[in-house]
Image (cartoon, coloured by chain):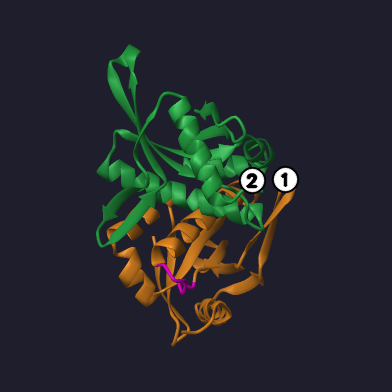
Chain colours: A green, B orange
Amino acid sequence: MPARDTYHNQVRKALINDGWTITHDPLRLEVGTKDVYIDLGAERLIAAEKAERKIAVEIKSFIGQSDVQDLKEAAGQYVIYDGVLEELEPERKLYLAVRQDVYQDLFAEPLGQIAVRKSGMRLVVFDSEKEAILRWIP
Amino acid sequence: MPARDTYHNQVRKALINDGWTITHDPLRLEVGTKDVYIDLGAERLIAAEKAERKIAVEIKSFIGQSDVQDLKEAAGQYVIYDGVLEELEPERKLYLAVRQDVYQDLFAEPLGQIAVRKSGMRLVVFDSEKEAILRWIP
């Protein structure tokens, strides 16, 4: 199983392959006396909208001992980062990047569905071997 | 700084001192193929309502290296457990138990407020020395 940094680089490359420009690695946000760091910030010109779309992407490797524990951490990061972005950069949308097998195994499970519904999570599913983006949900 | 289990016992006693009966320690909930465990389940007869009120209480010690990391874990546990209870025991309300100093230092901060707002967290603040419940929020 590749280490955390491997997935970071794969998602970075998959976003570039998908036409995104990486603008922050990581994206640092200051909230009161605390700093939070989201893995990547990216932008892409959407021709049809004649507008720049901005995203922040947090990469979860799900390589911990317990997938339930990993899911709790992912949900917690998501709700807090999403709240921080709403206040500081409301035009930037947050996505959690997960591998295809993690999406199929864990996010298709009832507990994964609960985590997505309750945290309002947006997902971007990537193929780690092909370094390709497969799906944006929603 | 006392260990995690110390706070568990203090909250347990504080709830009993507040008139609650501990019914589960821990409260186990089965979701699909996964199990989740919430620290305590408790009940109390509310005379005015002539009804039994049921709660689940997750105790967060906030004794980790990073309070931002602790806050993410607390928010993640909260949203997932809250979603599980909504499906399996909708009459049981979830509370996160935190010490008074953690409440004042971290939850009064902008990042703590974001975590509470985005996760819909209910808090029960306890005095660890007096083993007493101080506030239910909301």
Residue found at the far bottom of this picture: B129
Q: Which residues are magenta?
A: B61-66
Label 2, label 1: how many angstroms apart (C-alpha)?
Answer: 7 Å
Residue at position x 72%, y 45% from top? Answer: B32
Residue at position x 50%, y 84% from top? Answer: B2
Q: Is residue A74 magenta?
A: no
Q: Are marks 2 and 1 in contact (CB under 8 Å)?
A: yes
Q: Position of residue A116 (x, y in %)?
A: 54, 40
Q: What chain is tagged by disc 1?
A: B
Q: Is residue B63 magenta?
A: yes
Q: Magenta span: helix, strand or loop, mainly?
A: loop
Within the image, what quadrant is residue A23 found in?
top left
Mark number displayed over residue B32: 1
Within the image, what quadrant is residue B16 found in?
bottom right
Q: What residue sits right under mark 2 in the picture?
A: A111
Q: Position of residue B103 (x, y in %)?
A: 36, 70
Q: What chain is tagged by disc 2?
A: A
Between A58 and B129, which is closer to the camera in this rendering? A58
> Mark 1 belongs to which amino acid?
Gly
Could you classify mark 1 by the number of other residues whose Cα lies within 10 Å: few (under 14), some (14-19), or many (20 or more)?
few
Horizontal side of residue B97 vs A42, given as left or right: right
Within the image, what quadrant is residue A55 found in?
top left
Q: Position of residue B138 (x, y in %)?
A: 39, 60
- As helix, strand or loop, the secondary structure at mark 1 comes to loop
